[in-house]
Image (tube, rainbow, N blue to C red):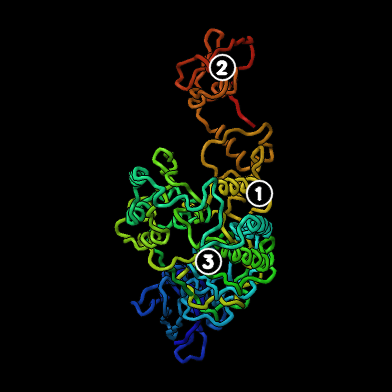
Amino acid sequence: MSFSGFLRQSTAVEIKFGPLVDPGGDVAEVVASFAASLIRLAKNGQNWASKNEATAPANEEPSGMYRVLLDATDTDSLGMLAVVTYTGGGVRPHRQTYMVMAANVFDSLFLGTDTLDVNATSVDTGAITAASFAAAAIDANAIASNAITGAKIAANAIDASALAADAVAEIQAGLATSAEVAAVQSDTDNIQTRLPAALVSGRMDASVGAMAANTLTASALAADAVTEIAAGISIPSAATVADAVWDEARAGHVAAGSFGQGVASVVGSVGSVATGGITAGSFAASAIDAAAIASNAITAAKIATDAITAAKIAADAVAEIQSGLATASALATVQSDTDNIQTRLPAALVSGRMDASVGAMAADTLTASALAADAVTEIAAGISFPSAGTIADSVWDEARAGHVAAGSFGQGVASVVGSVGSVATGGITAGSFAAGAISEPAVASNTLTANKFASNSITAAKVAADATEEIAGAVWDELRASHVAAGSFGEGVASVQGAVTGSVASVVGAVGSIAAGGIAAASIASAAANKIADHVLRRPYGSARTSSDGDAVSFRSLLGAMGKLVNRWSISAGTLTVYQEDDSTSTAPGGTQAVTGTAGADPITQIDTT
């Protein structure tokens, strides 16, 4: 037994079988009658059977070698294939063994037209290069949420050129500009000129109208004035104020910079986002280049909280962001003036007003009748109200459980425990990436371009309506010449313009119209023309007569002429009548013709086409 080679599964093949020799093994034998059934096969240890392919073995040369054909049935089982024959007549039995391999394995090893299907248990360092990634291979779905953490971004990676103008504008939104600080400075300077130089007994020294010193004494207040003032005062408790604060609807308090705006969208607990992995050693330097990442793959959700730290932003990016903003020295000047003003203001407001030292008030000046209704209200506002600190304490110490009305501030922050910081936008997700998998050398320069970030990424549909319209417009405005890949939609419509000039083999449905002259003689292949002619010549007379297509039937037509050739006709009294296919009806396309005879003329005895 000898091993003779490898065969492709379920594939017809010719094998060289032999040599067939005499029992002594010295003389090559030529079998006179070698039937196909004498070639016996055993497929991977199964029972012996004659080969399925019916061609008898053919002798090729005096050396005893034969040409044996096997078909797809003969090679359909994977594993060892034993081929044996014994012809008798003084010829020694002969056996050859082959290994039948799966088609893709055979094609991979011997033809190089396929690749082996494998499950890789490890990847060599540097094996995954930039060329390994198809364009847009790493899309939004392939990148894990929070995969791009602060540690993944190199120091100074985000420089001024990487920041789009709208990004700078968004960063600067809500910050003070140097011009705005200058305006505050100007107002502060003006206030300085209108304040007393120092407080008097902790109060601002002020001149109030016509009131003389010691005017508003205890004796100056009549009993009925005190009664009327007391009757007009209704002071809510700190707990009532706290209840009103937490039960207030959030929707009406969204002024920029206010506490209402800050917590207006907070509902539920703030959780955490995990990261994921492929090992860093699997990526060659610059393996993930700009072409490998799909446009809009890196959405806001892909960038982890605090991923972009100070070290990640280049100096020129910082300079661009700070351009036009107030400097530390300018703020220091404002702070100095503010500190000075602080020393000349009372320590706290009283009922929302500045505490001042009033001049004098004559006895019994402030009577009940002398107090206008708004004066009573103003006085009442300053009496026995809890301080702002007390109210604030009551608000912040209020139990959350009692304030969960839908839409209220209380419900909005009911489940928030601990400090709520800021959450940066970004992202890339996939549990298949191990910690540290995408290291700095693996990411090519300029990979994270502006087109990798999705517009309107934080929306329900992820793509805004105007983006959809823009994409659709771009598709239809795209030049056809660049999109002719086999099997693509681009190739399918590449030649369609005006009249149909390309293949319409796959068009389903009716073709609306064909331009005049659209079907030229050259457009009809010879086979198609022959088929049309064959259908015309073989069409039954009756089918053509009863069809609703074409002109009205008449005797003087090709159909009428054909009827005269193939249908019954008769001559009577000088009239030739041609009938329809039923041999009895003579109306169109049947008809009549006048027949004129010539006396003594030779009779017609035969008509023969030559």
**Quarter assignment of residue 125:** bottom right
Neighbor class of circle 3 (other Cα within 10 Å; few <14, some 14-19, many 20+) is many
Q: Which residue is mark 1?
A: 478
In the rendered image, the residue lying farthest to the top is 573
**Quarter assignment of residue 170:** bottom right
Neighbor class of circle 1 (other Cα within 10 Å; few <14, some 14-19, many 20+) is few
Q: Quadrant of the N terminus?
A: bottom left
Q: Secondary structure at mark 2?
A: loop
Amino acid at dot 3: Ile
The location of residue 558, given as percent across then percent down, is: 59, 23
Mark nearer the N terminus (3 vs 1): 3
> Which dot, 3 or 1, sits closer to the camera?
3
Q: Which residue is mark 2?
A: 554
Q: Quadrant of the C terminus?
A: top right
In the rendered structure, are the residues bearing label 1 and label 2 in contact, judged by CB atoms less than 8 Å apart?
A: no
Q: Residue at x 52, y 85 (%)?
A: 28
Amino acid at dot 2: Ser
Q: Which residue is mark 3?
A: 303
Neighbor class of circle 2 (other Cα within 10 Å; few <14, some 14-19, many 20+) is some
Q: Residue at x 37, y 54 (%)?
A: 384
Give the CA separation, mark 2 to mark 3: 83 Å
- Front in this rendered view, residue 422 or 419: 419
**Residue 451 in sight:** no
Placement of 387 over or under 101, stated as above or below = above
